[in-house]
Amino acid sequence: MIVFDGVSFSYGDRAILTDLHFSIRADERVAVLGGSGEGKTTILKLIMGLMRPDSGMIFIEGEDITGKTEEALRDVRMKFSIVFQEGALFDSLNVKENVAFCLREYTALSEEEIDVKVRDLLRRVGVEQALEFMPEELSGGMHRRVAIARSLAAFEPKMFLYDEPTSGLDPVNADNICKLILDLSRNGKGFIIVTHKVFDALKVANRFIFLQDGKILFDGDREQLLHSPIPDIQIFISELQYKEEAKNV
């Protein structure tokens, strides 16, 4: 579904991604790992056409999107459900209105149909009780769940994109979000999760891409990641070893 062919991207004079080559099928569960500033979120924005690469091509279902107009990119973006780290809910709208916004924008549903759809989506992500809450009244975990519901509102995506979905959450809420991510992928739809939290990535993904200095340092499965001889990866996954030791204290 997604192919990066020699993709490079810079912010001014600072190279973020350099000559990336990879492909991801629509049914794969992929975690993109790496430290802060390594270009993980940039990959998601490039997939959505929110940014354009300096060089190289990006194919979505065999179609090069790098030269597409904003109007043409709308069809590309509807293939994905994306949830950015901050959730980006409208502060002035309650939960119901946040989720209903996209339905009013992109569908011809009546208000009665929108109400039924909103309740169904919130039930699907486990926060129907928050229907009338304002964003500031939501816990971090509920905020992420509502953001996911809103991303599903107007259409059924072919693939999910998550930007640091468990960042800043306590372990219980982080685990709940991981379970929701897996639940939404049970119908064969894959996802890309961008994260620096290897512990959470290992709960949901079965393929791992590790970025360092704008390049792919590692691309493999769970066992290959955990037993990688690459020193920088061993340091990165020490978070997992630390948490396992802490549980046994």
Image (cartoon, rainbow, N blue to C red):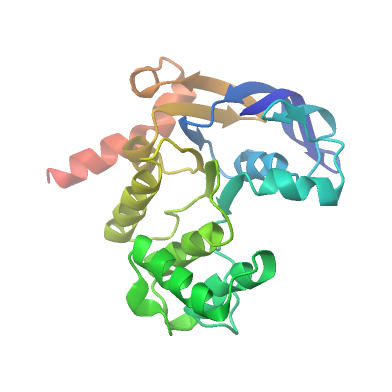
Residue sitting at the far left: 249
Q: Is residue 118 above or below residue 162?
A: below
| Residue 32 in picture, x, y percent from top left | 52, 35
| Residue 106 in picture, x, y percent from top left | 67, 64
Residue 140's image quarter?
bottom left
* Residue at 62%, 44% in the rendered image: 79
* Residue at 40%, 42% in the rendered image: 185
| Residue 157 in picture, x, y percent from top left | 55, 47
Residue 214 visible in rendering:
yes
* Residue at 39%, 48% in the rendered image: 184
Residue 37 visible in rendering:
no
Q: Is residue 229 above or below residue 171?
A: above
Q: Is residue 47 above or below residue 105?
A: above
**Which quadrant is the N terminus positioned in?**
top right
Residue 138 shown left or right of residue 112 in the figure: left
* Residue at 21%, 39% in the rendered image: 244
Towards the viewer: 61 or 89: 61
Residue sitting at the far top: 229
Residue 165 shown left or right of residue 169 in the figure: right
Residue 87 shown left or right of residue 11 in the figure: left
Q: Is residue 145 above or below residue 34?
A: below
Task: State the count of labels.
Answer: 0
